[in-house]
Amino acid sequence: MAPGRVILAALNELTPAQLEPALREASEAWLRRLHWDFRATAELIRSYVAMRALDGLALIAGAELAGYCYWVHEGEKTLLGDLFVRERWRGAAIENLLLAGVIEGLRQSRLPGFGARRIEAQLMQLATRASALLPEGPRPRAFPRLFMLRPWTGLAAPALRGAWEGLRFTPWSMPFQPAAARLIAEVYAGHVDSEINDQYRSVEGSGRFLQNIIQYPGCGIFLPAASWLAHDRSGAVAGLSLSTRVADDTGHIAQLCVRTEWRGSGLAHELLRRSLDCLQSAGLRETTLTVTEQNSRAVSLYEIMGFHPIHRFEALVWE
């Protein structure tokens, strides 16, 4: 639908009741398109809006709320947490209007240390491709990504023999979190995903990334029993697979990585196999994950393990 007569309003000027129709539609869209239960995130949004503590914009069309976008600041970086436009208004015109207001507001921000130097976004519900975003500028860098699904097959994931067989495997344990953060920072040095998420560029940032997976519902409910660590003979962490639950029947692989010297050994395959088996044993009937299309090695592994794309989206970065 064409924009027509619309205005932008700060989220902290609204009530949860005004936002409710959009949150209800967002929850339905996340479940329908991505098999993801958005209700816990929606409840957090309601709570912060009620406290007038959520930074963001809403787009009002006449007497109705057509969409919203919220963000959080992390030092000199801003993360766009979600941008959702209701189906009646969904399309490039409205999405660009809302996103332009967000970007311009952040660029003009004068809060010390906040949010104009870098903006990151992985907007799963955005209908408009980067090539058609913000024709007046500023244009983002775009990184195509896949959202992949593996249905429950009734069979255990296939095992693969390899050089990894001398390693020791343990379920996730909190004392290993510092070592896991060091591993992630090492593995993603110079990797395309560190261009998408700059937390990967340092041990401190990787530690915050892990905290987000373990403590907050943005990536689902963390499942330590389905999350695995591989240790070499010295006890160092050689690889890890972290799992969450994103819906009653749906698991999610939130992170899978192995140290450089173990690439090609079959270790990533084995870590993923263990997580998938645990998720199936827990009664989850399908598993999802996201991957950058440029990461062809990872995409090939996931396809071998039975994943297939159900959604394509773009990670966006403004510098």
Image (cartoon, helix red, strand yellow):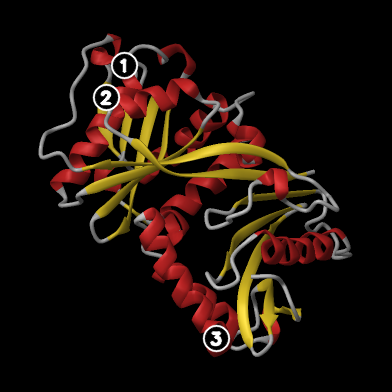
**Which percent across, then down, holds residue 254?**
41, 43
Residue 231 in view, yes or no: no
**Which percent across, then down, holds residue 264?**
39, 12
Of marks 3 and 2, which one's residue comes earlier in the chain? 3
Q: Residue at x 59, y 68 (%)?
A: 85
**Amino acid type for the residue under numbered disc 1:** Gly
Q: Which residue is mark 1?
A: 266
> Residue 270 shows which numbered tag?
2
Q: Residue at x 58, y 33 (%)?
A: 193
Secondary structure of the residue carrying tag 2 is: helix
**Amino acid type for the residue under numbered disc 2:** Glu
Task: Report which quarter residue 88 is drawn in.
Answer: bottom right
Task: Report which quarter residue 246 is drawn in.
Answer: bottom left
**Which percent across, then down, holds residue 306?**
27, 32
**Compared with residue 58, is residue 187 higher up or lower down, i.e. above or below?**
above
Between residue 25 and residue 184, name the one nearer to us.
Answer: 25
How crowded is the residue under tag 3: few (<14 C-alpha within 10 Å), some, or many (20+)?
some
Residue 265 in view, yes or no: yes
**Amino acid type for the residue under numbered disc 3:** Pro
